[in-house]
Amino acid sequence: MGRSASLFSMVLWLWVCLQLRPTTSSISPPLHTNQGFQESTNSRNVKQDQDGVHEVHCSRERSRAAWKIIEEYLMPFVEKEGYQISSSCRLHHENDLYRDQEQHKIHVDINEWRCGYCKKSFYAENYLDKHFDNRHYNLLNVSQNKCLADVCGALHCDHVMDSKLQKTKCNPAAAARNHHLCESLADGCFPVSGGPSASRLHEFFLRQFCDAHTCTGGRKPFSRGRKKRTSVFYLCISILTLMLLPLFYFFVYLYQRGLRRGAQNFRRISESGRKKKPT
């Protein structure tokens, strides 16, 4: 009886051990698999974060259009007033995310654009833009919200970038939003309490940009004019004129001198012919 109990206990113990081994081995692999999945997930998140760093949600093209409008339709009048725009103004050059990169563009020739950072050349400006995005992204200060394209609605960027949009039907809600944004720019950049120059520029900004944000028609943007451009053709013609003018007068002088000499020689011949006539 005692042997039977001992034998039964031994068999029971072996059975329990055999049951525990598969259980343990079946649990371990899933734990290892979960750990690998967690590491894979973490690495994928890091990769997504690294990829996300290069995604700048600010249109370079529209920012460039906005800055062009500021330079041509606003800054000449600001400079004429001798007014200094505050850096808190959204139109200030420091609030343009791409301003430093745009200033490092070198337009060598019609088919050659050069990077001012690494001196690499490209056939077109859009290739240089891609080069900036890929190679010199670290120079952009993306920590602050400085996207000049955000004020494009107030500055009529679409009017400059695409003339076809002028024929589309006006949206009253969009016009009201752009008008409100435009007025907020006028208040923030040229506060009426900032003095006579600021007050005059405030009024100018409303007439130049804000009045055209309406669907009633009759008012066009930039009604106060733009920066006067010096035509390259006009400049070349002026230089050629200044160079050829002295030559023209020199040839005129030689021509008149030749005429005088011819007249004198003709007179001498006539006088000598008269003297030789028989009496």
Image (tube, rainbow, N blue to C red):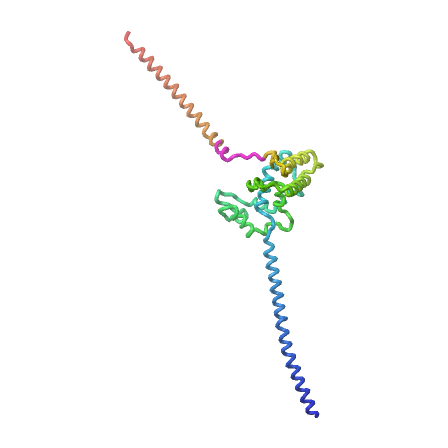
Where's residue 226, x and y in %?
A: 58, 35
Name the residue: 60% across, 64% down.
40
Report the number of discs. Answer: 0
Q: Residue furthest top?
A: 279
Q: Quadrant of the C terminus?
A: top left
Residues rendered magenta in the picture? 226-237
Q: Is residue 41 visible from the viewing direction of this image?
A: yes
Name the residue: 63% across, 38% down.
215
Nearer to the camera, 26 or 199 = 26
Determine which quarter of the picture holds residue 264: top left
Residue 6 shown left or right of residue 121 in the figure = right
Where's residue 34, x and y in %?
A: 63, 68
- Magenta region includes residue 236: yes
Above-or-below relation of 101 to 275 = below
Residue 192 shown left or right of residue 121 in the figure = right
- Magenta region includes residue 144: no
